[in-house]
Amino acid sequence: MSLKQFLTSRLFFRHLALAVALVTVSILIVLLALKFYTRHGESLAVPDLLGMTEEQFSVVLEKSNLKYVIVDSTYKEEVVAGGVIDQVPDAGMHVKRNRKVFITINAVAPEQVSVPPLTDISMRQSLAQLESVGLLPGAITYKPSEFHNLVLEATYNGRRVITGELLPKGSQINLVVGTGDGRGSVSLPDLKGLTLDMARAILIDSMLNLGAVIYDQSVISRIDTLQARVWKQHPDRSGSPYVSVGASVDVWLTIDELRLSQEYPEDQDTEIRNEEEESFF
């Protein structure tokens, strides 16, 4: 039988059909095996673990067929010791069975840090020193001194702090800064168009304090607070270009470009946020 006759014979087509059937069956078996192995289409909702201790969330995750890894710990006063303060993936997300949930728990006590040298240096240096170890600037007050912008005293809970002593990370340190001879007033900066962080830095450099922080209705989320810019301040330079050293300056912030480009009266329903609050909400 010639090749041409074989390719047109029933025997050839019978073998071809058999080969196609075998390949199709093999593919279906592989797909079914993969679906079974990966549980394609099946997912579990990650439970909300925030605030739970390890004894509690380990039981919840076991029932949900999920595993966990504790990756970090930090301290928040408002959360129970050992309680969950962050989880990845977030609660409500759908994941595969046996997926690991990465957890950050609340430390039993805040981390202790050593107080760096804070006095007899410029205020800018002192603030940088605080930031480098995880301490926060508290109230900044000014008093007459022959040394301009020099930190004269640093206090915590009403007492002077000593270089090298241990304090809880995140503690607020109050600073007393010299004004220099005859510096009873300073030039009032124009803060319009600046973000809150930029405005705060300029006020510190000008020996002034940040007062009330007021967001309008355009600011909704935490990200909005970072992007919002000052559209109004009090006092402003329309009254007097000078204010007393240490005076507080209130700022109004928005993400509304129209408001940033024009003058508007203050909203009746703007919401005042206290700068000392930990979160926007």
Image (tube, rainbow, N blue to C red):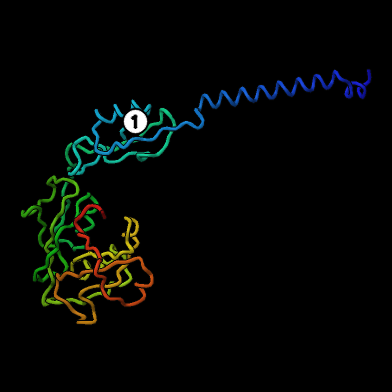
- Residue 269 occupies quadrant: bottom left
Q: Residues within 10 Å of mark 1 (few under 14, many from 20)?
A: some
Amino acid type assigned to the residue bearing label 1 in the image: Tyr
User: Which residue occupies 18% across, 42% down?
Assistant: 110
User: Which residue occupies 26% across, 55% down?
Assistant: 280
Q: Position of residue 173 (x, y in %)?
A: 14, 55
Q: Would you name the residue on which mark 1 appears?
A: 68
Above-or-below relation of 136 to 269: above
Q: Position of residue 240 (x, y in %)?
A: 19, 82
Q: Position of residue 274 (x, y in %)?
A: 20, 59
Q: Which quarter of the image is occupied by the C terminus? A: bottom left
Above-or-below relation of 79 to 171: above
Q: Secondary structure at mark 1?
A: strand
- Residue 46 occupies quadrant: top left
Q: Which quarter of the image is occupied by the N terminus? A: top right
Task: State the residue lying farthest toward the left.
Answer: 159
Count of numbered badges drawn on the protein = 1
Left or right, 49 with respect to 151, comes to right
Q: Position of residue 205 (x, y in %)?
A: 22, 68
User: Which residue occupies 31% across, 77% down?
Assistant: 263
- Residue 241 occupies quadrant: bottom left
Above-or-below relation of 65 to 120: above
Task: State the residue lying farthest toward the front.
Answer: 268
Q: Nearer the viewer, residue 275 or 125?
A: 275
